[in-house]
Amino acid sequence: MLRRWLKANALLAPTGVWLGIFLIAPLVVVVEFSFATRNTGVARAVLPWTAQAYLTALDPAFLPIFGRTLLYAGATTLLCLVLGFPLAWFIARHGGRYRTALLAAVLIPFWSSYLARIYAWKALLDGEGLVNTVLGWVGLDRDGGFLLTHGAVVLGLTYGFLPFMVLPLYVACERFDVRLVEASHDLGHGRVSTFFRVVLPGVMSGVLAGSLLVLVPAAGDFVTPKLLGGVEQSTFGSVIDDQFRGGNNWPLGSAMAVLLLVLVVVVLVLRGRRGEDVL
């Protein structure tokens, strides 16, 4: 019995070791730091253990930042879904021999540094940037440009994580039986009714997978809010970065990271249950 179990799980051993060293161990260290005491010396976290960092992280003063993080992540996920679904459907159903090239075009942004691309958006959204200049031709420009606004942050996040939505949707759209659409039309349903009753449930696995792939990193991103939003648009991710760097408060940063991780896990569990109900 033991030998059979070892043979069945032998292929999983390298992956298990890898996850244990590079995923589980760092998480354990972060949790340990979150219960430590702040120290301004060389050691950023020392004994005795305490829950003070969690009490500080749960202070009502951080609630607006917490809510802003959820708002940005939710808006980014919704925009990626709205923009990504038509693109994924077109590639899957009408791409033809150009399908591979179109998928490669979706992945082209990953060929360059994410930080460099966000800096490019920073230049575009500045008061003298291309976006404000072009909108000025029709009288829609804005004093100071669109930098350091909520819209700039959501735009940057959407641009950065859109491919994560397109790829799962593409797989779901490719597997979808288009004959179901024809059958729906034959039964008297219009385009809108067919989309919500037939198409959307048929590709729901891709919608859920893409939403998770966008929601999770968008909630923890700190580069985009820092560069495109500034202090007024801080998120949990940017505050965590500040605590580990300029704030020199590793226990508080670790506690916030753990709380954000718990939030993501809760969302994953709820999404998973809903996905099972839908499917």
Image: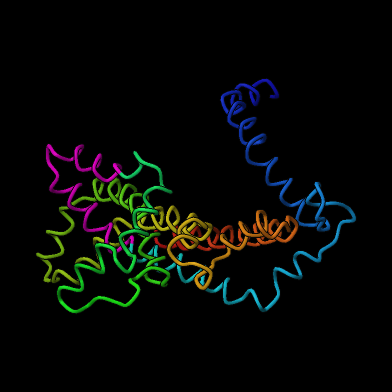
Residue 266 % position (x, y): 58, 62
Front residue of 182/132: it is 132
Q: Was residue 96 drawn as part of the magenta stretch in this picture?
A: yes
Left or right: where 232 falls relative to 192: right
Front residue of 216/56: it is 56
Q: Is residue 74 above or below residue 42?
A: below
Q: Residue furthest front?
A: 128
Residue 182 % position (x, y): 12, 59
User: Which residue is at a point 19% across and 67% down the rendered structure image?
Assistant: 134
Report which quarter residue 53 is drawn in: bottom right
Q: Quadrant where the C terminus lies?
A: bottom left
All told, the count of numbered labels is 0
User: Which residue is at a point 32% across and 69% down the rendered structure image?
Assistant: 127
The colouring scheme, among rainbow, by chain, secondary structure or one colour, is rainbow
Residue 215 % position (x, y): 46, 59
Left or right: where 35 falls relative to 115: right
Front residue of 161/173: it is 161
Give the main secondary structure of the magenta stretch: helix
Q: Residue furthest left?
A: 186
Q: Quadrant where the N terminus lies?
A: top right
Residue 63 % position (x, y): 61, 76
Which region of the structure is painted magenta? 80-108
Left or right: where 16 falls relative to 164: right
User: Which residue is at a point 64% across and 57% down the rendered structure image?
Assistant: 257
Report which quarter residue 211 is drawn in: bottom left
User: Which residue is at a point 33% across and 60% down the rendered structure image?
Assistant: 80
Q: Was residue 224 drawn as part of the magenta stretch in this picture?
A: no
Report which quarter residue 150 is drawn in: bottom left
